[in-house]
Amino acid sequence: MYKWLIIICFSLVVFHGEIRGEEVVPSEPEEEKSELAKLMHEIDVDYKVVEGMSGWYKYKKKHWKIILNAGENMVKVTKKIRTKFARYDDWTYQELMEKMQIAAEEMVKVAKDGEREGALEDAQWQVRMLRRTCAKCHKHLDIHIYPNLYKKKDKEIPPAP
Ligand code: HEC
């Protein structure tokens, strides 16, 4: 009887260990991400929302709401980045971060008045303005995100101050 209990306990421990082992390994790169990278990831999610919709020819009220929400998030996160991760030794970075905030703020303005004629085109324009800031800043910092998000990161990106 006891023998079985011991065997069961033992295998539970081993089994548990295996599961834990599996859980821990893939999540490791996640934990290594800097806070700035996480904030950037948030920007990325919202940016992709507005970009994904930018080819449409008409937005309904509920779509404007989604755009408004994405824009507001981007403003919020960009402001946070600008205060927490300012780089006073890198004027281009500072300027492009500000431009990203302005582009997101403009997006909010457009989305708040979605019924207005030309609002759709203005929203599309703001998506382009946003994309320009992403591309310029990543190029400036030599970040090649999409082909190789994590592997080259350590070498290419200077640590946040
Ligand atoms: C002013 C500079 C700047 C602008 C503008 C900028 N980025 Fe970034 N981005 C960075 C930096 C710096 C990192 C690297 C962060 C790190 O790994 O610590 C980064 C990393 C990223 C990452 C990788 C995050 C991860 O999960 O490791 C994504 C995705 C990203 N940016 C998307 C965007 C998008 C989308 C935009 C435009 C809407 C944008 N970025 C605009 C500076 C910028």
Image: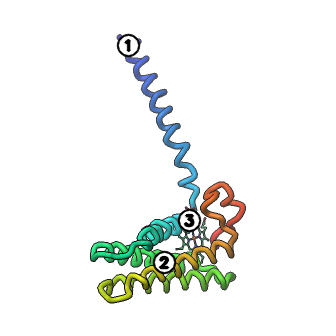
State the image quarter where residue 5 is shown.
top left
Task: Give the left or right position of residue 128, taking residue 93 as reference.
Answer: left
Residue type marked 3: Ala
The percent coordinates of residue 46 (x first, y second) are 44, 69
Label 2 element class: helix
Nearer to us in this view, 134 or 52: 52
Q: Which residue is mark 2?
A: 127
Outermost left residue:
61
Q: Which residue is mark 1?
A: 2
- Is residue 9 positioned above or below 45 on the image? above
Residue type marked 2: Val
Write the residue at 64% across / 72% down. Answer: 138
Outermost bottom residue:
117
Label 1 element class: helix
Label 3 element class: helix
- Is residue 29 positioned above or below 20 on the image? below
Q: Earlier in the sequence, mark 1 or mark 3?
A: 1
The percent coordinates of residue 94 (x first, y second) are 61, 83
Q: Is mark 3 within 8 Å of ligand 1?
A: yes
Disc number at residue 37?
Answer: 3
- How far apart marks 2 and 3 lie (CA) works out to 21 Å
Q: Earlier in the sequence, mark 1 or mark 2?
A: 1
State the image quarter where residue 35 is shown.
bottom right
The percent coordinates of residue 49 (x first, y second) are 42, 68
Nearer to us in this view, 94 or 96: 96
Residue 83 in sight here:
no
